[in-house]
Amino acid sequence: MADNYLENKYEEYQARKNGLGKPTVVIKKQVQTPVNKPKEKKVSDYRVFVTGGADGIGKAIVEAYTNLGCKVAFCDINNGLGRMTATDTGALFYCLDVTSRKDLEKCINDIFTLWGDIDIIINNVGISKSEDITQSDVDDFDHIIATNLRPVYITSRCLAMHRKTDEAHYGRIVNICSTRYLMSEPGWEAYAASKGAIHSLTHALAISLAEMHITVNSISPGWIQNNEYNKLTPTDHSQHPSQRVGKPEDIARACLFLTEENNDFINGENITIDGGMTKKMQYK
């Protein structure tokens, strides 16, 4: 039986080679099942929460979204600057210290109650301190980690827990990292550690939150001048391949891009925005 089987198969093979006995291909019409695609949200419908939104990059992000007509809320520890930004932009301001898990979670849950959901979270808050490691204080290290890193996890976790019972099909988280995650100078251990962890946490969150239709990306700014831009020197600008120092608006525009509803194929990525400095070889 086995021998006959092989002989028959060989004959079929020879027939195909000679153009005989070609199989008839029947193309069946495929019936597509209609997919209930969620209605695309208008940009003005976006509900946005920004940490550290009173000044600098955070303020530029708040301004960018409010200029589009989005609902925007932000938190900051600086009550004076926070109130000024809220007045200028019309955004909601929550004065709090992000190192307090209780206060940060309460803020987010209050926004859920007010708006029903949050579509976009920009984890921007961050502090830095440079000092010789032999003179540094471990408490300072812990404080920078608690300010820069832990809120990224807390806000993302709050959104994930809220979305467990929600049918939302759109969510974006953007974490403000830094080029310090891959390059350093002496005395920046705590800041570099916090930003390196944000870089890693970003792709971990992207995988964990994928089923909830939430993308998670990070942005690594280089030199961004928040104030007194006109006091920079020609050398400050010319050392950048882009021939200028960065501005907060450069980062805000990237946030707008990453949080567009159609840009869901960018996920778990880090985008470096530094005028090309990390690509420039420098030897002394």
Image (cartoon, rainbow, N blue to C red):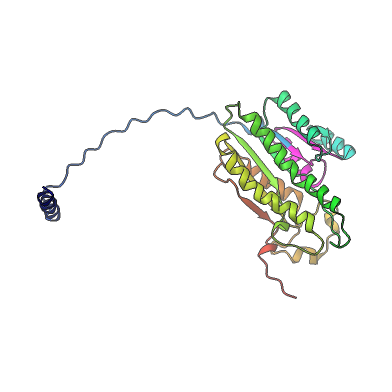
Residue occupying the point 61% across, 47% down: 203
Classify 223 as above or below 93: below
Quadrant hosting residue 48: top right
| Residue positioned most to the bottom | 284
Question: Residue at horizontal 67%, vertical 61%?
Answer: 276
Percent coordinates x, y for residue 280 in the rendering: 68, 67
Q: In the rendered picture of this protein, how many numbered marks are placed on residues?
A: 0
Image position of 85 (left or right of 155): right
Q: Which is nearer the eye, 62 or 100?
A: 100
The C terminus appears in which quarter of the rendering? bottom right
Residue 66 located within the stretch drawn in magenta:
yes
Q: Is residue 74 above or below residue 12?
A: above
Q: Is residue 158 magenta?
A: no
Residue placed at 67% from the left, 51% from the top? Answer: 199
Q: Position of residue 102 (x, y in %)?
A: 79, 33
User: In this orientation, which residue lies closer to the viewer: 149 or 221?
Assistant: 149
Residue 238: x and y, percent? 75, 66
Specify whether residue 224 is in view. Answer: no
Residue 83 in which image quadrant: top right
Residue extending farthest front = 1
Which segment is the magenta one?
50-77
Residue 266 horizontal/vertical position (percent): 57, 46
Q: Is residue 281 above or below residue 189?
A: below
Residue 239 showing in the rendered view: yes
